[in-house]
Amino acid sequence: MQISRDFISKLPKSELHVHLDGSIRLTTLIDLAKARGVSLPSFTVDGLKQLVFKDKYNDLGEYLVGFGYTTAVLQDEESLERVAYELAEDCTAEGIRYLEVRFAPQLHVSKQLPIANVLQAVDRGLSRYSSSFNSRLEVTNGSEPPFRFGIICCAMRMFNGNFSAYYNRFSNVHCFSPEKRLFGLASEELAMAAVKIRDDSGLPIVGFDLAGQEDGYPAGDHRSAYQYAHRHFMKKTVHAGEAYGPESIFQAITDLYADRIGHGFHLYSTDHIEHPGIQDKDRYVEELANFIADRRITLEVCLTSNCQTMPFLKSLEDHTLRKFLDSNLSISLCTDNRTVSNTTLTQEIELAVKHFKVDRKQLKNIIIYGFKRSFFPGSYPEKRAYVRRVIDYYEKLEREDLLNQGE
């Protein structure tokens, strides 16, 4: 039975791993840059696609260049609100009904823009669009599930004075702290801010993340931040196994209490294991994968992004998604960065269907489990009721699609 792009696009989907600053519309980037005096390599969409936001990149460094331009225009409440609104609009246009937007608030903080205002601006954009979308008749009459969202705060594994005004001031204040302690302190500060703002204002800050350069900057440096988030019932995800091996994923789970793993590509890469105490590398990887499977720790898989940042991947078929599926791991297909990777969630799912022979049963499990493993901003009974509405709507669309195919 054929799984068409049109069917995938219509399906209710969750987007659990998408960066706000990597998903700005290029037309908006140009508008904001002109208004704020930010220099761009080109002020046309085609020019930016040719010079910065490409289909293919030579390495991770080239992939990250675009973020310097996007974060530069997102230094005020108006721009943050606008980009958040437009991201929600773009997502629902392809059937996404649950969205978790992640970004590093400390990249946008300044003397004129406190961290609470940063988070409130993003929430306003998402809430404004949510109110508009959910007032539609098909949502109010119960025939379709509403649009819901949450915000994930990203801490950075490392930073320097070029990252942002906030990190520059933070480094100056803690000028006698060793780097590793400095990075951990900044993460702990963010964790405390996220919890307080969530509790005081009711903002749907649903999760805590750790992003940035993985190799050489271990997750353990941020243990205190994650302990604080864990003690205050903040759900946790960690970028791990993207540029480093299984040990990074192990540390994310054991030291940072990760509920989900961002990417996890190198879960099975025994050649990336460096600890001399791990003698039987195959057994280590097998036990780690079994633990992840048993505890339903979800892997946020980003196919296009991985192919763009890992030059050694000569074809999509070389991606470890095949092993994830064969091991029955809990996965959620995600975009990572819609603009930087020039992709959509529909496209990511279509790639999985085409290149990894994902059938209808597997597709349904992947999509529904994305909703189940979300950091939903409500009570557990509310989440269950919401997921039930999603399943009912999914099955309705599936019946219609099979009928159209004559099944």
Image: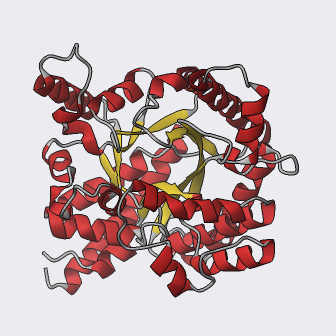
Q: Residue furthest top?
A: 277
Residue 389 in view here: no
Q: Quadrant of residue 84?
A: bottom right
Measuring from the top left, give residue 315's x and y in whole percent.
18, 64
Would you place residue 5 above or below residue 70 in this image? Answer: below
Q: Is there any visible trace of residue 51 in the rendered image?
A: yes
Residue 39 figure quarter: bottom right
Who's the residue at 33% across and 44% down the image? Answer: 299
Q: Position of residue 135 (x, y in %)?
A: 65, 72
In the rendered view, tell whether residue 39 sits above or below residue 313.
Answer: below
Residue beneath the point at 17% across and 33% down: 270
Q: How is the image coloured?
A: secondary structure
In the image, what residue occupies the spot 74% across and 60% down?
Answer: 124
Residue 323 in the image: state x and y as whole percent.
15, 46
In terms of depth relative to the viewer, which is nearer, 90 or 363?
Answer: 90
The image shows a total of numbered marks equal to 0
For the C terminus, the image quarter is: bottom left
Q: Looking at the picture, does residue 66 appear above or below residue 218?
A: below
For the point 66% across and 62% down, which residue is it?
Answer: 126
30 shown above or below 123: below
Quarter of the figure with the N terminus: bottom left
Q: Which residue is nearer to you in this view: 74 or 201? A: 74
**Residue 197 falls left or right of residue 66:** right
Instruction: Residue 174: give x, y in percent of width and height.
Output: 74, 25
Residue 109 falls left or right of residue 308? right
Whether residue 188 sits left or right of residue 306 in the image: it is right
